[in-house]
Image: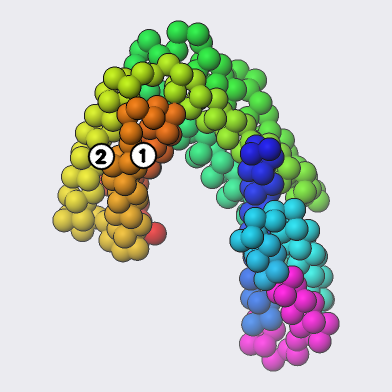
Amino acid sequence: MVYAQNQEKEKAEAFLALAEQSKEKVESLKEFAEAQGIDVPDEADTLYETGSGLLAQAWEAFDGGDYEETIELAKEALWNFREAIKVLNKALGPMEEIEAESEQSALGEAITRVRDRRDRVLDIIDAMLESYPNLDTTGIIMEIKDTLSGPDNPFDAHINAAEDYLAETTPDVDAAAKELGEAHRLISSALVSLKKHVAGELNSERVKDFLTVITNFYNRTTKLVDRAVQQGLLVDPQKTEIYDDLTEVSTLIGSVDVENIDEAVSYLMKARSLLESIQRAIVDLRKGGPKGG
């Protein structure tokens, strides 16, 4: 049930992103038409207003956890925005069609994010195996890794399928979003299996050791962030975001109860993931990446 909900949530997010992209495109075209002294057709205005209303309802449904309703409303909003784009393109005369490009861009970014999410899970697995070489005596953890990165693994199969759908002459957005949802489901399933296995293998003493490792990692990362701020490499808004993440890590570490193994492992794994992300952000800045978010 949890897997299905996560999959629906990811799919809903994908459609919301597409609808927002299309809405922005309509707004850009309307502004361009007005700048050229061209009257915006009433039909385009009506379609835009209808789509905006549906999109607002879609966000309300999403915030309420009704992802199925979110998807349906976002699809309707997307249809209205697409039609508005067609009407505006016709009014503006010969123009490059950018609707498909916009959709591909939005889902392309979503594919990049899900790959990054997979990589973070693999980083967590590698770090745990490095700290506890005897943790995977049954081979379950390696099976989880193979599902996400082994030869002919299903994760890459879904991602490749999504990219293929987007590369078609007429991109199949629905099919691509479905494949993307399946990729997210595999990651969620892997995390659940990993937490269950680790919780079963680690005793309270091992949890204490793991807590020490994460606490030391947190202290090193905090110093790294402070140094980047002092050197002017890390500025707002990214600075605030990273310090918020460090606060969350500190809260997770402080909430660990070594006798409650399942919960402790969950907290420490989340802390580890956040710290890995922070370190990657600092490394990117030192390589010359953007200072802001």
Rendered-image quadrant of the C terminus? bottom left
User: Per the image, is 38 magenta?
Assistant: yes
Q: Is residue 44 left or right of residue 58?
A: right
Q: Are marks 1 and 2 in contact (CB under 8 Å)?
A: yes
Residue 154 tag number: none
Give the colour scheme shown.
Answer: rainbow
In the rendering, at what x and y percent does residue 257 appear? 33, 33
- Dot 2 corresponds to which residue? 218
| Residue at 66 percent of width and 26 percent of height | 154
Question: On screen, 40 above or below 141?
Answer: below
Rendered-image quadrant of the N terminus? top right
User: Which residue sits furthest top?
Assistant: 137
| Residue at 24 percent of width and 35 percent of height | 215
Label 2 crowd bin: few (<14), some (14–19), many (20+), radius 10 Å: many
Q: State which quadrant residue 202 falls in.
A: top left
Query: Between residues 47 and 31, which one lies in front from this camera angle?
Result: 47
Part of the protein shown in magenta:
32-54
Question: On screen, 144 above or below 97?
Answer: above
In the rendering, at what x and y percent does residue 160 appear? 67, 34
Residue 271 tag number: 1
Q: State which quadrant residue 16 falls in.
A: bottom right
| Residue at 25 percent of width and 39 percent of height | 218
| Residue at 38 percent of width and 10 percent of height | 134
Which callout, 1 or 2, points at the residue further toward the start of the chain? 2
Q: Which amino acid type corresponds to the residue marked 1 in the rendered image?
A: Ala
- Count of marks overlaid on the render: 2
SS of the residue under disc 2: helix
